[in-house]
């Protein structure tokens, strides 16, 4: 099982390597203007605006996952482990748990919203019949890396990933998307990309590997079906 996960991590996104928003900006890129305190009170309007903007950031970041209770199937090309089935749960506020089955391994991925970033708390093999972690279990987990970070704009970096494109067009078996955010990881002989779309999360994963004297090797996982509650 560990061997399968390692292959998945390196060859598929290598899968997802190991696999935000502007503080004052909503998901559609519009910025709210501060309101004037017309009542003449001593209220701190700048603090109120900061709190409002923080809420916009939180909502936007969590929108890069499917809703609670959703499931999805990804068509795989280039490798037997590229075909994926996932289920999505949101067992507690600010947490998202994804169970991912590639036919060779069953992996639990736990994400948490923390300020202007989504942190990965867990990415491990589990049993097929394993339950979603309890709130107490979730709260005991520690971050292992950053999945996504704001502001959501070209040039934002986190760990060894970078946002390289906004409003990208990406074709999947499910549909053509015109508003994908593309994050990219570049190594010595590989490039990994993840295409994220609001309300759908990952719609495509792409891993390109170069080997000396051989053609470029490409592995993709593309959204094919979605079931929402």
Image (cartoon, rainbow, N blue to C red):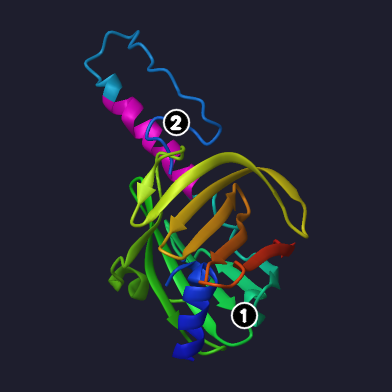
State the quadrant of the C terminus: bottom right
- Front residue of 70/103: it is 103
Residue 146 is drawn in which quadrant? Answer: bottom left
Q: Nearer the viewer, residue 219 or 210?
A: 210
Element on which disc 2 rests: loop
Left or right: 152 with respect to 158? right
223 to the left or right of 16 = right
Residue that appears at 62% across and 80% down: 81
User: Is residue 49 located in the magenta-colored stretch of the structure?
Assistant: yes
Residue furthest front as drawn:
213
Residue identified by numbered label 1: 81
The residue located at (51%, 63%) in the rendering is 90
Pick whichever of labels 2 and 1 is earlier in the sequence.
Answer: 2
Seen in the image, is 9 located left or right of residue 77?
Answer: left
Q: Going 56% across and 88% down the picture, which residue do you hit?
A: 128
Q: Which residue of the protein is positioned furthest toward the left in this rendering? A: 42
Report the magenta residues as a range.
47-61
Task: List x then y, in percent, for residue 63.
Answer: 54, 49
So how many labels did they put on this image?
Answer: 2
Residue 120 in the image: x percent, y percent?
38, 64
Q: Residues within 10 Å of mark 1 (few under 14, many from 20)?
A: many
Q: Main secondary structure of the magenta part?
A: helix
Q: Nearer the viewer, mark 2 or mark 1?
A: 1
Residue of label 2: 25
Element carrying mark 1? helix
* Residue 186 at x, y percent in the picture: 44, 57
């Amino acid at each position: 099982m560990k061997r399968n996960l390692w292959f998945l991590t390196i060859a598929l996104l290598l899968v997802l390597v190991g696999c935000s928003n502007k503080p004052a900006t909503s998901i559609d890129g519009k910025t709210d203007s501060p309101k004037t305190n017309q009542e003449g009170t001593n209220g701190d309007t700048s603090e109120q605006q900061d709190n409002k903007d923080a809420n916009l950031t939180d909502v936007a970041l969590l929108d890069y996952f499917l809703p609670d209770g959703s499931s999805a199937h990804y068509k795989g090309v280039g490798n037997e482990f590229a075909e994926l089935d996932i289920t999505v749960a949101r067992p507690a506020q600010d947490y998202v748990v994804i169970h991912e089955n590639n036919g060779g391994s069953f992996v639990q991925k736990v994400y948490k919203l923390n300020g202007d970033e989504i942190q990965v708390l867990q990415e491990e093999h589990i049993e097929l019949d394993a339950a979603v972690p309890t709130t107490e279990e979730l709260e005991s987990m520690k971050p292992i890396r950053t999945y996504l970070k704001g502001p959501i704009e070209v040039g934002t970096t986190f760990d060894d990933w970078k946002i390289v494109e906004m409003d990208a067009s990406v074709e999947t078996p499910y549909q053509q998307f015109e508003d994908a955010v593309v994050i990219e990881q570049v190594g010595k002989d590989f490039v990994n990309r993840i295409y994220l779309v609001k309300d759908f999360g990952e719609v495509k994963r792409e891993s390109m590997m170069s080997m000396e004297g051989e053609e470029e090797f490409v592995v993709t996982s593309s959204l094919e079906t979605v079931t929402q509650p």
